């Protein structure tokens, strides 16, 4: 495929001139940001799996309820659970929730 340019080639101001072949890697190595992404991804998977299993168990236990009644009962159960656990567990729940929200908002989890 031939490429044809009628004028001067205009590049973005942040372009990088590469002396190597086109398919070489330009970045690599250890990255603290990548470690943070991986940790957040693992916490998100853990917390979503745990929440999904708990919700499935709750639904199986309360099969005859309407959706609205089940939702209000689940909310009450969740509030009682949060009140009953020690502060360390509350912090862990908050961290898992924050990690889940962060990971869901990111397109590259791992």
Image (cartoon, grey):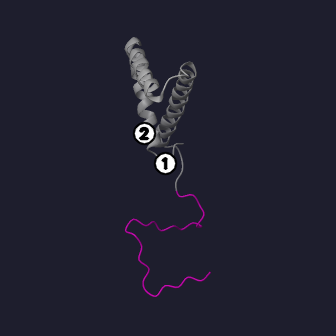
- Read off the residue under disc 2: 102
Q: Which quadrant, please, contains the C terminus?
A: top right
Could you say which is closer to the camera, residue 74 or residue 19?
74
Q: Is residue 13 magenta?
A: yes
Residue that appears at 50% across and 34% down: 44
| Residue 101 occupies quadrant | top left
Residue range in magenta is 1-26
Residue that appears at 46% across and 24% down: 70
Disc 2 secondary structure class: helix
- Up-down relation of residue 53 to residue 8 (above or below): above
Q: Which quadrant, please, contains the N terminus?
A: bottom right
User: Which residue of the protein is positioned furthest toward the right in this rendering?
Assistant: 1
Q: Is residue 21 left or right of residue 70?
A: right
Residue 85 position within the rendered picture, expressed as x and y whole percent measured from the top left = 41, 13
Residue 102 position within the rendered picture, expressed as x and y whole percent measured from the top left = 42, 39
Residue that appears at 59% across and 83% down: 2
Q: Is residue 49 magenta?
A: no
Residues at marks 2 and 1, CA–CA distance in whole angstroms: 10 Å
Q: Main secondary structure of the magenta part?
A: loop
Could you say which is closer to the camera, residue 90 or residue 59?
59
Mark found first going from the N terminus, 2 or 1: 2
- Read off the residue under disc 1: 107
- Up-down relation of residue 82 to residue 31 (above or below): above
| Residue 33 occupies quadrant | top left
Could you say which is closer to the camera, residue 12 or residue 58?
58
User: Which residue of the protein is positioned furthest toward the bottom in this rendering?
Assistant: 6
- Name the mark on residue 48: none
């Amino acid at each position: 495929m031939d490429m044809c340019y009628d004028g001067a080639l205009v590049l973005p101001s942040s372009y990088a001139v590469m002396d190597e072949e086109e398919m070489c890697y330009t970045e690599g190595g250890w990255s603290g940001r990548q470690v943070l992404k991986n940790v957040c991804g693992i916490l998100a998977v853990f917390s979503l799996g745990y929440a999904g299993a708990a919700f499935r168990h709750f639904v199986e236990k309360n099969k005859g309820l309407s959706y609205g009644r089940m939702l209000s009962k689940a909310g009450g159960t969740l509030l009682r659970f949060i009140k009953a656990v020690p502060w360390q567990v509350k912090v862990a729940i908050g961290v898992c929730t924050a990690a889940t929200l962060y990971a869901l908002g990111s397109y590259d989890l791992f």
